[in-house]
Every structure is written in structure tokens, then in C-alpha cells.
Amino acid sequence: MNMKKLFLSLALMLPITAFAQWRVGVNVGGDVNHYSVSTQFQSDLQYKDRWGVTMGAMGQYNFFDWLGVRAELDWTQKNYRMKRPILGYVDYKYTNNYLQLPVMASFSFGGKKLRGFCNLGIYGGYWLNSSRKGVEMNTSGLVAYDFSEKIDFNDERDQRWDFGFVGGAGLEYRFAAKWAAQLELRYYYSTVSVQKDYTGFKDNRYNSTLALQAGVWYCF
């Protein structure tokens, strides 16, 4: 590479380096999960959305004042509820904890203190553990009782790896020279069934999760 091409390359990089900025932060919030499942011939089964908690650590690199790339490591609950009205008292509340890694392009717009932003990307996740509690009928079907138990994973049945798309939008307020606060509404759409085809026929079950989270950034 001759000197002319070298200077031209450096000149093209200057706008990027002028705006380049690292930031790190933490977030916490709540989410509501929708468990999509085909009940097939079990018409008495009802699956309901259920609330959970999400929190994590964030990192972002801004190439320009309007464009950056964000990565997070989040602990997110994808809970749901299952009821059988025909049996009366049967009511299960499932708690599912996931570790997720969203990677997103982050677009921002607005003034120096108050800015809007949107994020769009993909995520990978891993199903850490599962438990349930609720009300069950005894074997005679006459007496209802409360229970709480941990659910053991079955490698033939349970798909613990997760993958999908993620997007969100929100507002950021720069309340100090190096500090900013954000509020974001985010949606996770899983493309992987949590249940494998272990019985010989498809019984796909998917999570889709809507989260409202607040975060604080330290900007270098």
C-alpha cells in the first residue's frame, strides 16, 4: 500500500473514531411470557401467560452518534401457567430460568440529553432450570392439595438451547457527563421448540417474551 492509499484509508476512518465510544451498564425489569403450544386432542388444557423477572449486564460500542452494536448477558424468566378447568382444581405455575446473550444493532436519534433508540438483532440462550407449583388432585380425584417441586430435565424430551430474534425500542436520558439511563420495551421471539420430537410426531412448543426493563450506563 502506497502512502496516498494509506492517508485515504485513515481519512475514511476518522469519522468513525471521532464518534467511537464504549459504554457498560446493568439492567433490570419484568417480563410476560407467552407459551405457544398445540393442545391437539387435550381440549381441557389451557396455557396462560405469566410474569417473570429479567436482569443482566450490558456492553455497547458506538461507531457513530446514531449507530452502535450492543451485547448483553441476561438472566430471564420465561414462565407460564397451565390449567385444566374440567378437573376443577388442577392449576400448575411453571418457572423457567434462562441465560441469554442478545447481540443487536442499536440505532439512536434525538438531542444530546434525551434520545430515542431502537435495537434489532438475534439472541442465543440456555434453559438453566425449571420448577412448578400449584394445585393438584389426588389419585381418587376427590381431594385437592398444594405442591411445589423442581422439574428434572429429560435429554430426549427437553431442548435446552434456545435461539431467536430480538427487537426493542425506548428512551435514553443523559443525566450526567458520563452517565445515562434507559427505559426499553423489548420482544424476544424464539424459533426453537422447547420440546423435541421424541414421541415420533411433532409437538412443538415456543416461548415469546415481552420485557420492560430499565438500565443505567457508564459512558467512557
Image (cartoon, helix red, strand yellow):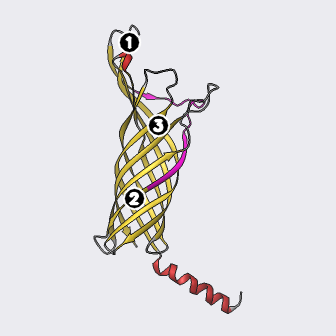
The first of marks 2 and 1 along the sequence is 1
Label 1: how many residues lie within 10 Å, few (<14), some (14-19) or many (20+)?
few
Q: Position of residue 145 (x, y in %)?
A: 32, 17
At horizontal 49% and vertical 32% (from top left) the residue drawn is 37
Q: CA distance from mark 2 to mark 3?
A: 29 Å
The residue singled out by tag 2 in the image is 169
The residue singled out by tag 1 in the image is 138
User: Which quadrant: the N terminus?
Assistant: bottom right
Quarter of the image for residue 13 reads bottom right
Of circles 2 and 1, which is in front?
A: 2
- Taking the magenta stretch, the answer to whether it contains residue 195 is no
At horizontal 57% and vertical 87% (from top left) the residue drawn is 11
* Pointers 1 and 3 in contact (C-beta within 8 Å): no
The residue singled out by tag 3 in the image is 129
Q: Amino acid at mark 2?
A: Ala
At horizontal 49% and vertical 26% (from top left) the residue drawn is 39
Q: Amino acid at mark 1?
A: Asn
User: Which quadrant: the C terminus?
Assistant: bottom left
The first of marks 1 and 3 along the sequence is 3
The first of marks 2 and 3 along the sequence is 3
**Nearer the observer, 151 or 68:** 68
Q: Which mark is residue 88?
A: none
Quarter of the image for residue 89 reads top left
Of circles 2 and 3, which is in front?
A: 2
- Taking the magenta stretch, the answer to whether it contains residue 159 is yes
SS state under label 3: strand
Quarter of the image for residue 66 reads bottom left
The residue stretch that appears in magenta: 149-167
Q: Position of residue 131 (x, y in %)?
A: 42, 31
